[in-house]
Each structure stands twice: as C-alpha cells, then as structure tokens.
C-alpha cells in the first residue's frame, strides 16, 4: 500500500482481508449459507472478532449475535466483522457505534458512529442513515467508508464507494452519485464557508468493500461493470464531487 493514502491509520487496519484467519472465517461463513442460514439456525452473525470488544457494555464473544439496537465498542488493535440482513460491517479498532433498529429486527435503520472507523456495504432499502457528530448520510444500496476523528473536534471523513447518498452537514447539503469512490469531509467548523468539502481517498481499499459485499451475496458497482480499480487503495478515479449547495 502507498503510505500517502494512510492518515492516522496503520497498514494492518486496511489489510485485514488478507489475514489467513479472516479468509478462513469468510469461507466458512459463505459455506454455511451466510446471514440467512445464520438467522434461520440461530447461529452467530459474527464473521470474525479479533481482540477485545464490548457489546452493550459487556465483553463480546465470537459466538454471540449482534442485533439491531446494540452498542459496540472495539478496543486497541481489535476489529469486528458482522452481518445483519443484507448489510455487512467491518468495525475497526477504537470505535464506538450503535446499530439502530429499522422496520424489523433484522433491518438496520441508522448506523450511529461516535468515534472510530467503519467500512460497510448496504443492500437496497429505504430510510437508512449513517450519522456522525458532524454528518448525516441518507443511504440506499451502497458501499461506504466512514471515519470520525475526536481529536479533530469530531470531524468526519465519508467516502461513497458506490451508490447514491444524500449528505448533510449543518446547512450544507449535496447528493453524491458514484460508481467508484467519491469522498468528503464533514467539518467541525466551516472551511472556506463550507461544512461539507471534497476529500481525497484515504484509509480504505477496494478489497475491503469487495469482501464485505461478497459476504452478503453482492458485488460492488465496479465489479458489476467489469471495471475493477486498483487493489492498493491509492489509484482512485478522478474525483468529481457534485457542487455543494448550502
């Protein structure tokens, strides 16, 4: 990986898909039928847990089930990969999130992030959001990378890896339509009069998004189009963010 694509993150955080333990876990997850089979058989929906994490304030075990309404915290050097319904999530180290309940027990309506970073893939559905202290993103079927930086007054980084997303930061709003990575900062304080500003590609890779999509039987937009991007997270297509309307 080209190091200039990493900002405040370590290589092993974005190379988790290459670990033998995860590849074995993902293969077993798929062989056992994925989320649908796990739900029907009342098995765990955790694909892999590495290190320490809390579920609703108590230590999380790999045999447990993450449900909508749950609060998740990951410790230093830890990560968690799990699936709910047609969506899959990779929660990186030092993250605090809540997966809020939608119309049914197995539908996530809001991914609420207080700190940390999450890569996520969402199947088609209505009335779903990713919410950080500085950003609200209305999502449909899409792939995302979201990062919250408490050391920068909770400034948020958001990449629409593919899909259509309605972004709001304070009074700034825009619609992002992407087939291959379109990124933004949601600022804690206005920058050049804006709270929502274009960003470069940092801290996540194609491979991460592709792997999560595969866990829930999906393909990314670039896979479906047969236009695969580079695997090192460095060579994203030219950024063409839509004009920001306030």
Image: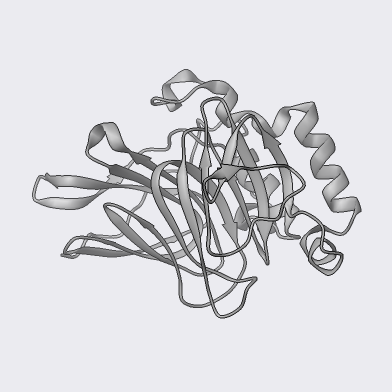
Task: Name the quadrant of the C terminus.
Answer: bottom left
Residue occupying the far top of the picture: 3
Q: Residue furthest front?
A: 58
Can residue 1 be seen here? The reply is: no
Q: Indicate the quadrant where residue 41 lies.
A: bottom right
Q: Position of residue 104 (x, y in %)?
A: 61, 78
Residue 152 point in image, percent of width and height: 24, 34
Which residue occupies 80% across, 27% down? 20
Residue 23 appears in view: yes
**Quadrant location of the N terminus in the rendered image:** top right
Name the residue nearer the viewer: 236 or 141.
141
* Left or right of residue 31, residue 239 in this image: left
Relative height, residue 18 to residue 146 (above, below): above
In the current view of this chain or complex, which residue is farthest to the bottom?
A: 103
How many dots with numbers?
0
- Name the residue: 24% across, 60% down: 243
Comparing 145 with 227, the one in front is 145
Query: Is the residue 167 above or below the residue 126 in the image?
Result: above
For residue 62, above or below residue 152: below
Residue furthest toward the right?
31
Query: Residue 158 vs residue 124: left or right?
Result: left
The residue drawn where x is 72% and y is 49% is 46
Q: Specify the color scheme.
A: one colour
Q: Residue 36 lies in what quarter of the image? A: bottom right
Q: Residue at x 29, y 52 (%)?
A: 133
Image x and y of residue 119, in percent: 54, 46
The image shows residue 159 at horizontal and vertical percentages of 43, 48
């Amino acid at each position: 990986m080209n190091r200039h694509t990493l900002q405040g993150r370590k290589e092993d955080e974005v190379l988790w898909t290459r670990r033998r333990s995860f590849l074995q876990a993902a293969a077993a997850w798929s062989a056992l039928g994925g989320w649908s089979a796990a739900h029907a058989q009342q098995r765990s929906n955790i694909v892999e847990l590495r290190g320490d994490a809390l579920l609703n304030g108590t230590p999380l075990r790999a045999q447990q089930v993450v449900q909508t309404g749950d609060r998740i915290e990951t410790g230093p050097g830890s990560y968690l990969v799990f699936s709910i319904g047609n969506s899959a999530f990779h929660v990186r180290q030092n993250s605090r999130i809540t997966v809020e309940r939608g119309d049914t027990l197995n539908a996530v309506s809001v991914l609420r992030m207080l700190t940390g970073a999450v890569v996520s893939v969402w199947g088609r559905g209505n009335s779903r959001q990713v919410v950080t202290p500085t950003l609200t993103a209305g999502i449909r079927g899409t792939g995302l990378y979201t990062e919250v930086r408490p050391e920068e007054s909770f400034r948020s980084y958001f990449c629409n890896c593919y899909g259509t997303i309605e972004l709001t930061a304070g009074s700034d709003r825009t619609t992002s339509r992407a087939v291959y990575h379109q990124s933004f900062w949601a600022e804690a304080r206005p920058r050049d009069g804006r709270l929502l500003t274009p960003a470069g590609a940092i801290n996540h890779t194609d491979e991460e998004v592709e792997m999560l999509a595969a866990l829930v039987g999906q393909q990314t937009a670039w896979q479906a189009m047969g236009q695969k991007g580079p695997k090192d997270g460095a060579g994203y297509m030219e950024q063409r963010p839509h004009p920001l309307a306030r």
